[in-house]
Image (cartoon, grey):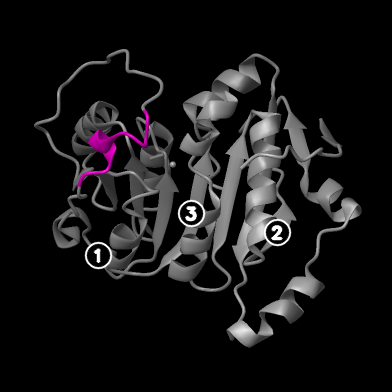
Amino acid sequence: MLRSFSVTIPKFEVSGASGSCPSSNSPSGFKRFRQHVNPLSMVYRQPVEIPNWTQCFADTSLPIHLDIGCARGKYLMDVAMSQATERNFVGVEIRRNVLQEAEREAEQRGLKNLAFVHANMNIHQIKLLQSLPAPVTSVSIFHPDPWMKKRHIKRRLVTQEFVEEMARQLANGTPIFVQTDVEELFAYMVEIFEMSRLYDFAAHYENPLGIPTDREKFVSKEGGDIFRVKFIVDKPAKEAERNVHTKQRLLKQSEMERIAVLHRGFKCS
């Protein structure tokens, strides 16, 4: 059942470094991985290793979907398999040991339109995006780490710097799909994107990739809520026009209510 609600924006003020194509050298078997890592640690601020895209993709000219925080990437593999001749997929994850499992499974599936990159997108964003062999035509940020303690908010993926750089690197009209089961985090991310004045927005009722993540399955099974929104890059053509665009897109309370939509008990068919 769908229902809408008003969001009270909290007054707050980074996440997921080497890259690779799927590799059979990754460890096998399932492991229990650490849930959180500190993206501000020097361990995750080292130079990123960019994959050789020609070795990753059978056709480097295909448009790219970028998934930030892909974790084990099982849903991303399913989507990539279903769109093998349509799009290439790049999954980014800050936890290297998690990616090793993803690479192993992708290798077993023989996917030639999927690559994983171990990177911190608050640090390696520019280098990674500028290295890609084709335009990014869509982005997904599904269930990012909420970092709920006040002293940890600075560790969140979505920051002012992050959304501004994404707008600079992506073409106008590029959608960024955001999804979480944490209402407070949802409100925070909406505020950060809107404050940049570089995006339009729309309520989004379904998973845009059509295949649920592991977290999404768990939340749905438990009867929880999924909060979704689509941000669309809409940067001014000229800096001088920015004030005009800002006035045209000032958020009204009714608009906030329109985008702050949840889908209770969402189940993907």
Q: Which quarter of the figure is the N terminus placed in?
A: top right
| Sequence-first disc among 1 and 3 | 1
Label drawn at residue 168: none
What kind of residue is marked 1? Asp
Question: What residue is drawn where x is 56% and y is 19%?
Answer: 218
Q: Nearer the viewer, residue 120 or 131?
A: 120
Q: Residue 32 at x, y = what percent?
A: 32, 13
| Sequence-first disc among 3 and 2 | 3
Which quadrant of the structure image shows residue 65?
bottom left
Q: Which quarter of the figure is the C terminus placed in?
A: top right
Q: How far apart are the alpha carbons under marks 2 and 1?
A: 32 Å
**Residue 147 visible in this rendered orientation of the protein:** no
CB contact under 8 Å: marks 2 and 1:
no
Horizontal placement of 96 versus 15: left or right? left
Q: Nearer the viewer, mark 3 or mark 2?
A: 3
Horizontal placement of 12 versus 136: left or right? right
Mark 2 element type: strand
Q: Is residue 240 above or below residue 122?
A: below
Residue pointed to by mark 3: 162
Label drawn at residue 59: 1
Residue pointed to by mark 2: 201
What kind of residue is marked 2? Phe
